[in-house]
Structure formats: C-alpha cells, structure tokens
Amino acid sequence: MKYLITGANGQLGQELQKFLSERQLNFVAFDSHQLDITDKEKVMSIFKQENPDVVFHAAAYTKVDLAEDEGRSQNWQVNVEGTKNIADAVKQYSAKLVAVSTDYVFDGMNLGEYKEDDPVNPQNAYGRAKLAGELAIIESDADAYIVRTSWVFGEFGNNFVYTMQRLAETHPKLTVVNDQMGRPTWTRTLAEFMLHLIETKSEYGIYQLSNDNTATWYEFAQEILKATSVKVMPVTSAEFPQKAYRPEHSVMSLEKAKSTEFEIPTWQDALEEFLNTIK
C-alpha cells in the first residue's frame, strides 16, 4: 500500500508524515512547491509517476481572514480547483482519498451538535470554498472520505496552543473570547482517524472528527496555561473584531466517527499528551 500526502509542510501534513513513519508505512509527501495542486497537468503527472493507493489530501488555503479580501483567488483556487484536481486524479488512478474539510461549512447557529447530513450554510469565504471542495470530491465519484474538523492544534506550524504559550511569556494577563463554542482537535488524533478509515475499510462519505468534549476559546486557553501564573480573562467576540465571520456554536457530532470503533480522546487528554511531547 502506497500513501501520497499533499500539503507536506502544513501542520497536518507534517503530522501525517511523522505518524506514517512511526508505523513504517510506505508514503511520499509533496509540498506546494513540489506539487501545485491547482495545476491539473502537474497533478496527473505526479499520480502517473507515483501511482498511489491512498491519498491524504492535507493541502489547503487556511488564512480565513485574508480569504475575505481575496475573494475567489487563492482561497478558491486551492480549496476548490486544487481539490477537484486531486479528486479527479484519485478517480482516474483508482486510488482512495481522505480529504480534510472544516466546521465552517455550518453557520454556527445550531445550539446542538451538527450531524454530517445537517444543512450546510457557510458564512465566510473560506467556508464557502471548503464546501465547494467537498462537492467537487462528491461529483468526481472517487472512492473518498471527507473528514470535517475544527480548532486544529499540533506539534507543527502555527496554532492556538503555541500562540497562547508565546503570549504568556510576556503578558501576566491574557483576554480570550468566551462566546464561541467548539471542539479542539489534535493533529495526531486526526491523522490516526484518517488512517483508521482506510485500514477498517469504513463506508465512504462525510465524517466529522475532533477530540471529544467541547470548549470555548477561553476554556481552551485556561487549560493550556493552567501550569503557569498567567491570568486568563474572558471577553466577547465583539471586543476582538475579525474580518471573517466565526461560528458561535460549531460543535460537530462525533457519533459517526465513533461508530467506526475509533476511540476518540477528550481534548483535555489530547492536549495534555501533546504538551508532554513538546516539553
């Protein structure tokens, strides 16, 4: 079995490489310079060269606020056209695809948990592009898993955990929004689930995967900094205006993921294990 990873330099792409290496699995990984997913000819050339059995599609444009300025340019090209190119290549070369999407396909107004088949209603440019990417995968008729996730943190790249730790070094008090609710996701848990879907030959379709339990950003920050003397204060989103809309309540149901017999750690346990690995 040969795996191909897109987005090799991203936080999930690097986690996937580390995880597959630990499992001693055969894989190749391409960053955006080695494989421009918006270039269909290049995508087909790489697939012809590598002939992968499974593609972990971790490449994405994730600058949520900048996406509002750029309209359909890089955000749309990477998350929609690039994803379409990958899905079409997967179909042509009879591979399997595991692609990553986002909770931002929902509007964040449901006070319960969003299920995979609940109505989508993205409220920002990034969410609209990721949803269009999902539809491109479905329309390609490739053997594919779409995994929606949220609030991603991990060892590689920039994320909320590292931001809080960095700010805590120079600030005795931090203010963090307390009116946005979601589920944090450790890249290791996400990588494990992506491989689990393949190894268990789960039914193709859309899944949702984060760590278990919910939190606000304020509660997440409190847990990150609980071993420090830094005081974390709750504030409203109105006090931290951002260009792109952020969902107030983007809690996605994990029941379908659990039905595959995948054990999902709580975000608190995942965070603790992660912090121990980077000490």
Image (tube, rainbow, N blue to C red):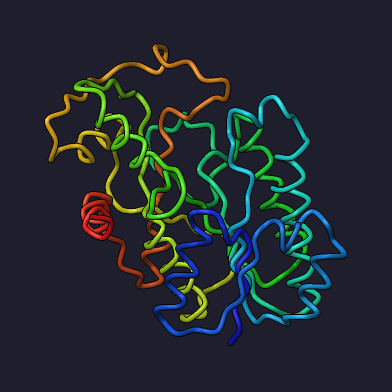
Residue 154, position in %: x, y? 38, 53
Residue at 41 percent of width and 63 percent of height: 257
Which residue is most to the bottom?
Answer: 1
For the residue pair 19 and 127, the one nearer the viewer reads as 19
On screen, residue 245 versus residue 77, left or right, reads left
Q: Is residue 274 above or below residue 4?
A: above
| Relative height, residue 203 to residue 211 (above, below) | below
Q: Which residue is drawn at the image coordinates 73% and 82% (left, top)?
A: 51
Numbered marks: total? 0
Left or right relative to 210: residue 246 = right
Question: Which corner quadrant holds the N terminus?
Answer: bottom right
Residue under the image location 61 percent in, 75 percent down: 28
Residue 209 figure quarter = bottom left
Q: Position of residue 38 (x, y in %)?
A: 79, 53
- Looking at this rendering, what residue extends furthest in the right direction? 41
Reply above or below: 45 against 116: below
Quarter assignment of residue 172? top left
Residue nearest the observer in this picture, 105 or 58: 58
> The C terminus appears in which quarter of the rendering?
bottom left
Residue 154 placement, left or right of 32: left
Q: Is residue 78 above or below residue 193?
A: above
Residue at screen point 69% across, 78% down: 95
Q: Is residue 128 left or right of residue 73?
A: left
When asked about the image quadrant of residue 233, the answer is top left
The residue lying furthest to the top in this view is 239
